[in-house]
Image (cartoon, rainbow, N blue to C red):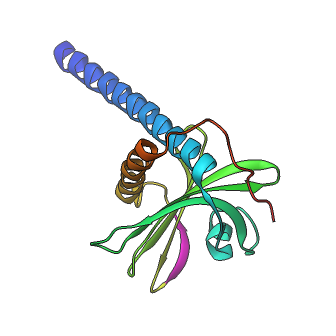
Amino acid sequence: MKIISFVTAVAIAGLYSTRATLAQECKADIDALYAWTCEQGRENRLQGAGAELLGLNTGADVPALRKAYQDDVTRTIYAFNIVMIKAARQTVMFRLTNQLSALWLVSQEGRISKAAEVTATGMRQVPAERHYNYFIETKDYLLNERSKAVADKPLTGKCLPIPTG
């Protein structure tokens, strides 16, 4: 009985340790994408419906700094956005395909604060974990593109102005 309790305690401690490590790695990844987008992003707009689903506004398009790429094979679009809402910088990532669009509002800690999806049947907020695999796919795809871009044009640490309207 004591051995099972000890084994269970070690397993739980390992799980929390792994989750903490993953959260730290995700924060570092989001920080890297943020710095890249802040410096080399292009002005764009986050569609109002998606912004509203994430609780950022009431449906109007939101000005953004964006880094976005489309995969040549799958045609999937991956994007990292920095938006200014009520004088606070917010990070929104999305992954678009013909069947499913997934959007995530990402906290400064690198965690998904809110998530939404758009499908043929409609748009809705969803639990953060529903498309977590797509979140990781999006993050990793953009990190790969960042690595290539920064090799060609190293970051200087300067940030472009975040568009506000």
Can the viewer see residue 99?
yes
Residue 20 occupies which quadrant of the picture? top left
Name the residue: 45% across, 86% down.
120
> Which residue is drawn at the image coordinates 55% and 73% (left, top)?
124
How far across and down, in percent of the image, does residue 125 sit? Answer: 56, 67
| Residue at the extreme front | 152
**Quadrant occupied by the C terminus:** bottom right
Is 156 above or below relative to 57?
Answer: above
Query: Residue 24's quadrant in the figure?
Result: top left
Residue 120 versus residue 62: which sits nearer the camera? 62
Task: Using the image, determine if residue 49 lies above or below residue 165.
Answer: below
The residue lying furthest to the top in this view is: 2
Whether residue 110 is visible, yes or no, is no
Relative to the observer, which residue lies in front, 143 or 48? 143
Asked if the magenta segment contains residue 33, the reply would be: no
Quadrant (top left/top right/bottom left/bottom right) for the N terminus = top left
* Count of all numbered marks drawn on residues in the image: 0
* Position of 96 relative to 160 (above/below): below
Based on the displayed image, in which of its 4 quarters is residue 18 positioned? top left
In the drawing, does residue 142 fall left or right of residue 18?
Answer: right
Q: Position of residue 9 (x, y in %)?
A: 29, 20
Front-most of residues 157 and 16: 157
In the rendered view, does 30 fall on the left or right side of 148? Answer: right
> Residue 57 appears at what percent x and percent y?
75, 66
Please tell me whether residue 125 belongs to the stretch shown in magenta: yes
Q: Which residue is drawn at 73% across and 53% down?
A: 162
The stretch in magenta equals 122-126
Q: Kindly report the secondary structure that dominates the magenta region of the rendered protein.
A: strand
Q: Compared to 39, does 134 lie above or below?
A: below
